[in-house]
């Protein structure tokens, strides 16, 4: 059965971020991907220079209207990431709601990009839009610890806190929550960070079953761009293949991330030379070179069921 994704994200001419990070991996895994580029930039903004254009909410609406007029607005998934504009975000919500009316089984995968490590990197006024409008229509969300705390108003200092926060997020709408990174201490030592996931499933008899998992992820001493976008795309793909097994979906997703990042680091250090810090262009994700790992990742990370 053909599976179609509407991905509304950034586009860069050079490198991998937003739709460039999501489309190829999803296509490799057999998904049809329709991309709307929320921005078109020469490269990501971590470079010394960047140029480009930003799509407005009205322009987004025009593109969607074109799809609708041709009666090809039928989707199984919607995927969104980084946005800086309130009206654009509200237009995304309108589109998601309309698509869900047409297909009640549509799954909306949202990376609620707000900030990290205690500081926001989107304007403050986006926060209530995510909290009150976006998260309630999302089915799968991938916040980091800071974003999860911000959305629920509750801080995480223990695993028990994290479970409580994930439950609060479930109550806001999404059935699947993955906290992609946290400051919780890892049992494997300070070279690892802890990620947590929770999935609510309605059983045939109407009762709700919750699977919660924890996974220890090796820390990496480098700054990558586009990894969050790849993560959300891979979680979409692997939850599609394992809709009621969050443990397996997360093991596959985190393993893909590990393989891509390791390949990227090796390449970047090789290109930079001994003792030199790799440049942003050398640290672009080695996506095409990781095709085999994306399609069938060797499982290198084991999740623990809580």
Image (spheres, rainbow, N blue to C red):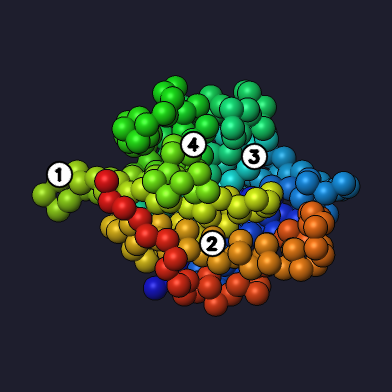
Of label 3 and label 2, which has the lower sequence position?
3
Q: Secondary structure at mark 3?
A: loop
Of label 4 and label 3, which has the lower sequence position?
3
Q: Mark 2 sits on what residue?
A: 258
Q: Residue at x 59, y 35 (%)?
A: 116
Q: Secondary structure at mark 4?
A: loop
Compare residues 102 and 69 and report the one nearer the observer: 102
Q: Residue at x 61, y 61 (%)?
A: 261
Q: What is the C-alpha distance between the residues marked 3 and 2?
A: 26 Å
Of label 3 and label 1, which has the lower sequence position?
3
Q: What is the C-alpha distance between the residues marked 4 and 3?
A: 25 Å
Compare residues 304 and 64 and report the one nearer the observer: 304
Disc 2 packing (10 Å; few <14; some 14–19; many ≥20): many
Above or below — where is 123 with respect to 163?
Answer: above
Q: What is the C-alpha distance between the residues marked 3 and 1?
A: 36 Å
Q: Secondary structure at mark 1?
A: loop
Q: What is the C-alpha distance between the residues marked 1 and 2?
A: 36 Å
- Kindly tell me whether residue 153 is visible in this rendering: yes
Q: Mark 3 sits on what residue?
A: 83
Compare residues 72 and 301 and report the one nearer the observer: 301
Q: Position of residue 236 (x, y in %)?
A: 46, 57
Name of the residue lying farthest toward the left: 205
Residues at discs 1 and 2 in contact (Cβ within 8 Å): no
Residue 183 numbered tag: 4
Q: What is the C-alpha distance between the residues marked 1 and 4?
A: 33 Å
Q: Residue at x 48, y 39 (%)?
A: 182
Q: Mark 1 sits on what residue?
A: 207
Of label 1 and label 2, which has the lower sequence position?
1
Q: Relative to residue 70, is residue 252 drawn left or right?
A: left
Disc 1 packing (10 Å; few <14; some 14–19; many ≥20): few
């Amino acid at each position: 059965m053909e599976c179609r994704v509407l991905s509304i994200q950034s586009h860069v001419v050079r490198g991998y971020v937003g739709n460039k990070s999501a489309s190829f991996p999803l296509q490799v895994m057999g998904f049809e991907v329709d991309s709307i580029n929320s921005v078109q930039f020469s490269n990501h903004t971590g470079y010394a220079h960047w140029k480009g254009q930003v799509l407005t909410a009205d322009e987004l609406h025009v593109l969607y209207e074109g799809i609708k007029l041709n009666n090809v607005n039928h989707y199984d998934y919607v995927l969104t990431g980084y946005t800086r504009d309130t009206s654009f975000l509200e237009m995304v919500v309108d589109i998601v709601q309309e698509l869900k009316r047409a297909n009640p089984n549509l799954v909306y995968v949202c990376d609620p990009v707000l900030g990290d490590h205690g500081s926001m990197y989107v304007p403050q006024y986006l926060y209530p839009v995510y909290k009150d409008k976006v998260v309630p229509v999302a089915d799968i969300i991938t916040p980091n610890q800071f974003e999860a705390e911000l959305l629920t108003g509750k801080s995480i200092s223990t695993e028990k806190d994290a479970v409580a926060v994930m439950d609060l997020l479930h109550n806001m709408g999404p059935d699947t929550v993955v906290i992609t990174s946290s400051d919780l201490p890892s049992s494997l030592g300070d070279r690892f960070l802890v990620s947590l996931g929770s999935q609510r499933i309605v059983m045939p008899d109407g009762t709700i079953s919750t699977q919660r998992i924890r996974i220890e992820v090796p820390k990496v001493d480098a700054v990558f761009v586009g990894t969050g976008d790849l993560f959300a795309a891979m979680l979409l793909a692997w939850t599609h293949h394992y809709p009621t097994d969050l443990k397996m979906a997360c093991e596959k997703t985190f393993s893909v991330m590990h393989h891509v990042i390791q390949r990227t680091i090796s390449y970047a250090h090789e290109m930079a030379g001994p003792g030199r810090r790799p440049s942003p262009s050398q640290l672009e994700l080695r996506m095409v070179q990781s095709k085999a790992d994306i399609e069938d990742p060797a499982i290198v990370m084991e999740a623990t069921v809580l």
